[in-house]
Image (tube, rainbow, N blue to C red):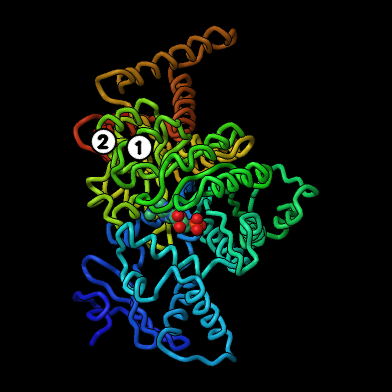
């Protein structure tokens, strides 16, 4: 049986096959999906390949990558590279089916994972098996997937490694400012406390060496045992730079005490790159009142807060969350009319995660997504990824998807990315730096709007020519007045005027302002949104200039 049929149950075309270290990979495509199917010890697994790519043109995607972007809603453990996770997952699956040799690193890793699975007891392999094997997971299934990911990733070394990789991946996607969020976890079997978890994350950030990382402008190296200046990391590194800040998440499964511990940790690490608090986790679990004391404490301490709000219908909680006045909210998928109006009145910025919402079936498809309802009236919103690894996406892919689903042009996409600067939690010079980065990208990407002149209205060809004639007259008069020796002949005056006019014309053209042959009028549409003009360049011979 072909791997496509077996794992995906559809009619897939095989693009290529690769075998490495006992793992067979097939790249398959159908009209609706592109996937990698892997076979390891007889088990087939599919991994989606940038789903949004199917909805947009490759050219649009390339352009979106070239644009600087700001990511404000990305979960660390949801953004793990497929390759990193796949290897761990496949090793994990192998344990369930095969005995292993304790001599190899791979099997030792598998053995560790298997032991943890057994010890923890909260996950039975048969419970998660089907979740691992499928690609589109409903919201509840996604959280089962996270439980599995956490078992695989939660030791200091792995936490540092995945953090490093996630930052490298965002930087490669031209994300210039990343607010990465993660839930500090206690794991006694790994001697891990919430604090040591965050230290491992910070260590991972500092270990990035393929790109310059700005973690915090105000590092107090003597106050934090494990911190060291990022300046050292800047030596010999290329020109790319990414600002990274952390949000500490409270998981909805946590108690008030555990939530409070997270907020206290965030307060303590304020000067070391932690800039805010997030409330996340399975929206069908936990009560708002459980987290409220910790969130209120965070607010009092001046920590900005973002809440996962309205991922499922829960009007009472949604209203309480909006009344709390968070600095931002994530998702906002299931708001009733009154709450929708309140959200808009309060102008709370919304972190929009298109692919995540569609893949978890929270929203049926991109074209009915509430993005448009927020975008049109200019409500503050930020395009984000949520979980690049789990949902096989990237920030560029989210922009490309928004572009194809809602008809955003390059300028609109750029403005959307640039506007996100206003909603970051980092304070101080970062905001100014980002504005400068976007200003220079605006020029690099040639996004200046050419304002054409229209024949027959304000700034017409007629008025332009009249201004030229007035100018020539003035020059001739001045020449006549200043020359006491000889009155210039009409010919001399004309020559002078012509060359001057040409200089003026060149200067204006190089400034991107209208010249006579570039004057346009309104019959044929050109490519400037909002304008419909005929470019006279091609017809210039017909005009006697
Ligand atoms: C699908 N949309 C979502 N809604 C709510 N919470 C989500 C989420 N996606 C991820 N998380 C939260 O982030 C954790 C994984 O990253 P960290 O271990 O914290 O780095 C998940 O366990 C979940 O609590």
Which residue is the site of mark 2?
Answer: 336
In the image, taking residue 85 as reference, residue 200 lies left or right, namely right
Crowding at dot 1, Cα within 10 Å, few <14 / some 14-19 / many 20+, comes out as many
Q: Nearer the viewer, residue 229 or 96?
A: 96
Whichever of callouts 2 and 1 sits on the residue coming sooner in the sequence is 1
Find residue 282 and report its horizontal and vertical position in percent.
39, 53
Quadrant (top left/top right/bottom left/bottom right) for the N terminus: bottom left
Q: Is there a contact, CB below 8 Å, between mark 2 and mark 1?
A: yes
Q: Is residue 445 above or below residue 78?
A: above
Residue 11 in which image quadrant:
bottom left
Q: Position of residue 43 (x, y in %)?
A: 34, 83
Helix, strand or loop for disc 2: loop
Residue position for label 1? 318
Which quadrant of the frame does ligand 1 lie within? Answer: bottom left
In the rendered structure, the answer to whether residue 421 lies left or right of residue 338 reads right
| Residue at the (31%, 18%) spot, across then down | 458
- Relative placement, left or right, of 104 versus 237 is left
Q: Indicate the quadrant where residue 8 lies.
A: bottom left
Neighbour tally class for label 2: few under 14, some 14-19, many 20 plus, Cα within 10 Å: some
Q: Report helix, strand or loop for mark 1.
A: helix
- Front residue of 436/491: it is 436
Residue plotted at (58% across, 68% down): 158
Instruction: Please give the name of the residue rendered at 28% of the width and 42% of the height, measured from the top-left corner.
Output: 334
Residue 268, compared with residue 12, is above or below; it is: above
Where does residue 451 sit, x and y in percent of width and height? 36, 30
């Amino acid at each position: 049986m072909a791997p496509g049929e077996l794992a995906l149950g559809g009619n897939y075309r095989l693009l290529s096959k690769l075998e490495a270290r006992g793992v067979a990979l097939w790249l398959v495509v159908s009209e609706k999906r592109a996937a990698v199917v892997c076979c390891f010890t007889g088990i087939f697994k599919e991994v989606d390949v940038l789903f949004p790519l199917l909805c947009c043109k490759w050219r649009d995607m390339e352009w979106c990558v070239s644009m600087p972007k700001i990511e404000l809603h990305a979960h660390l453990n949801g953004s793990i590279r497929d390759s990193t996770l796949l290897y761990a997952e496949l090793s994990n699956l192998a344990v369930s089916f095969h005995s292993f040799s304790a001599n190899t690193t791979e099997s030792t890793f598998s053995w560790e994972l298997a032991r943890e699975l057994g010890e923890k007891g909260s996950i039975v392999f048969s419970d998660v098996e089907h979740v691992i094997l499928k690609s589109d997971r409903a919201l509840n299934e996604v959280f089962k997937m996270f439980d599995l990911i956490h078992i695989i990733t939660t030791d200091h070394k792995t936490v540092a490694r995945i953090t490093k990789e996630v930052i490298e991946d965002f930087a490669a996607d031209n994300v210039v400012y990343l607010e990465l969020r993660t839930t500090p976890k206690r794991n006694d079997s790994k001697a891990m406390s919430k604090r040591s978890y965050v230290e491992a994350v910070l260590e991972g950030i500092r270990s990035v060496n393929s790109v310059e990382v700005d973690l915090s402008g105000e590092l107090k190296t003597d106050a934090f045992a494990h911190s060291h200046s990022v300046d050292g990391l800047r030596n010999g590194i290329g020109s790319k730079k990414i600002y990274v800040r952390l949000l500490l998440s409270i998981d909805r499964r946590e108690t008030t005490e555990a939530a409070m511990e997270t907020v206290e940790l965030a307060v303590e690490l304020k000067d070391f790159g932690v800039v805010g608090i997030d409330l996340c986790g399975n929206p069908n679990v936990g009560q708002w009142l459980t987290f409220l004391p910790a969130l209120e404490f965070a607010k009092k301490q001046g920590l900005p807060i973002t809440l996962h709000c309205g991922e499922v219908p829960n009007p009472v909680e949604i209203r309480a969350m909006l009344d709390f006045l968070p600095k931002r909210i994530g998702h906002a998928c299931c708001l009733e009319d009154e709450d929708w109006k309140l959200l808009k009145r309060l102008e709370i910025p919304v972190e929009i995660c298109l692919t995540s919402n569609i893949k978890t079936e929270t929203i049926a498809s991109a074209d009915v997504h509430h993005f448009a309802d927020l975008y049109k009236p200019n409500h503050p919103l930020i395009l984000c990824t949520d979980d690049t690894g789990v949902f096989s996406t990237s920030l560029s892919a989210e922009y490309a998807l928004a572009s194809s689903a809602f008809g955003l042009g390059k300028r609109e996409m750029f403005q959307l990315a640039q506007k996100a600067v206003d909603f970051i939690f980092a304070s101080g010079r970062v905001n100014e730096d980002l504005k400068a980065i976007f200003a220079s990208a605006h020029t690099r990407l040639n996004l200046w709007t050419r304002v054409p002149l229209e024949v027959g209205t304000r700034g017409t060809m007629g008025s332009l020519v009249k201004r030229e004639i007035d100018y020539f007259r003035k020059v001739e008069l001045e020449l006549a007045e200043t020359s006491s020796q000889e009155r210039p002949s009409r010919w001399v005056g004309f020559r002078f005027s012509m060359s001057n006019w040409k200089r003026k014309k060149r200067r204006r053209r190089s400034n991107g302002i209208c010249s006579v042959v570039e004057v346009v009028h309104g019959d044929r549409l050109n490519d400037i949104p909002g304008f419909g003009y005929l470019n006279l360049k091609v017809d210039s011979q017909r005009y006697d200039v």
